[in-house]
Amino acid sequence: MNGAKYSQLRAMLAITKGSLRGIFRSPSAVVFSLGFPMVFILVFGFIGGSSVSVKVGIDRQTDIKSEFYQGLMHVNTLKMIADQPAAEMEDDLKKGRLVAILNIIPSEGADHVMHYDIQMRTSTASDASKKQILLNILKGVTTKLDDEAYKRPTVATISQTEIPGREFKTIDFILPGQLGFALMSAAVFGTAFLFYNMRQTLVLKRFFATPIKRTYIVLAEAVSRMIFQLISSVVIIALGHFAFGFTLVHGFATFLEMLVLSVFGLLVFMGFGFVVSSLAKNESTIPPLANIVTLPQFLLAGTFFPIDSFPGWLQPICKIMPLTYLIDALRKVAFEGQHLWHVSWDIAILTLWGIVVYAVAVKVFKWE
């Protein structure tokens, strides 16, 4: 065949097609890219809509017909348990399953107005924030009954105005994190195993016997993974949006911008995969090396928890990781309605990471 007529692009597309077919036939690729993220999204999607519930036990001595008790009954946040045996209730309190046990004792005061002695028993195992919520509820009911019993002048009048806002749901936090995790895992593990196996099975060596250039071999594999991950990203975002109301502020435009960020993040993390495949001495060393890259980012890059919730000394480490900036950019675009030029800082940090990791990859990558 005449070398001048050899089409590098056509050869690259042929490799891309074959590689893409192999990815779809690989169970591990499907599990890493779709299985794990979708499980997490389903779990957090179903529990994300639940509101705060304060579970309290009601002492058997409580007058459940009293006005105070009836006032508590109208508070949706409270879940009152009145039919449990005293011993079980006490055990639940000690184990933190109950926030408190309430005993409401009414008595008529000298002013012929019903007064209530509210005995609230808590435990060190009880959730401190829920104890505070319960105290505020008790104070609120007390204030309401006081206002009904005593017609007193007030020193302040509270007026409330509500403006339209955007509810930040659990899925709005979780989905970008899981999307970033899926991209990172597929890029690092997939690339590392692919090029290591291609070297070991002499596939790369056979390619060298053909006119195709090395650059096109890498591009073909990158494009095939990009197509597969884009399909995975579409499925993940669509599931979150249609099943759990994941916020896409600008609709289809936001969706497209998330896909652009996904491609960019995938390219950066593929560089880590090239490095891992070159450093691995044998196939069994690939997972430990890849986990050194992926596991800290999975735990610390804001995948499940806001970085602000970590100790102060740990937060600078979290803010070094490239996954932190990919997830942050995805959240800003999806929920805050920012565009790609608004997240230029996150993109710049990812670009810097890409330059560094590909510089290392060029130095250590082995073709044979």
Image (cartoon, rainbow, N blue to C red):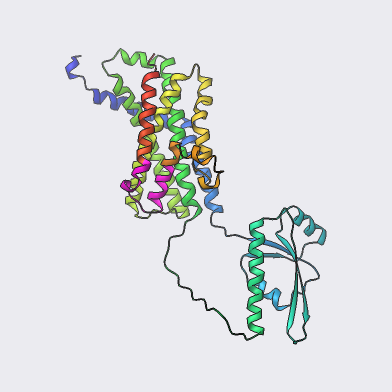
Q: Is residue 335 part of the magenta span, yes or no? A: yes
Left-right relation of 252 to 71: left
Q: Quadrant of the C terminus?
A: top left
Q: Residue at x 82, y 58 (%)?
A: 87
Q: Residue at x 74, y 79 (%)?
A: 115
Q: Where in the figure is residue 266, as x and y percent of width and height?
A: 39, 35
Residue 29 versus residue 71 in the image, above or below: above
Left-right relation of 361 to 43: left
Q: Quadrant of the N terminus?
A: top left
Residue 6 versus residue 231 in the image, above or below: above
Q: Which residues are magenta?
A: 326-346
Examine the residues drawn in magenta and state their main secondary structure: helix
Q: Where in the figure is residue 118, as x and y percent of width and height?
A: 74, 71
Q: Residue at x 45, y 50 (%)?
A: 240
Q: Is residue 67 visible?
A: yes
Q: Going by the picture, which residue comes out furthest to the front?
A: 155
Judging depth in this view, the residue of 216 and 96 nearest the camera is 96
Q: On the image, which quarter does residue 213 sit in?
A: top left
Q: On the image, which quarter does residue 228 sit in?
A: top left
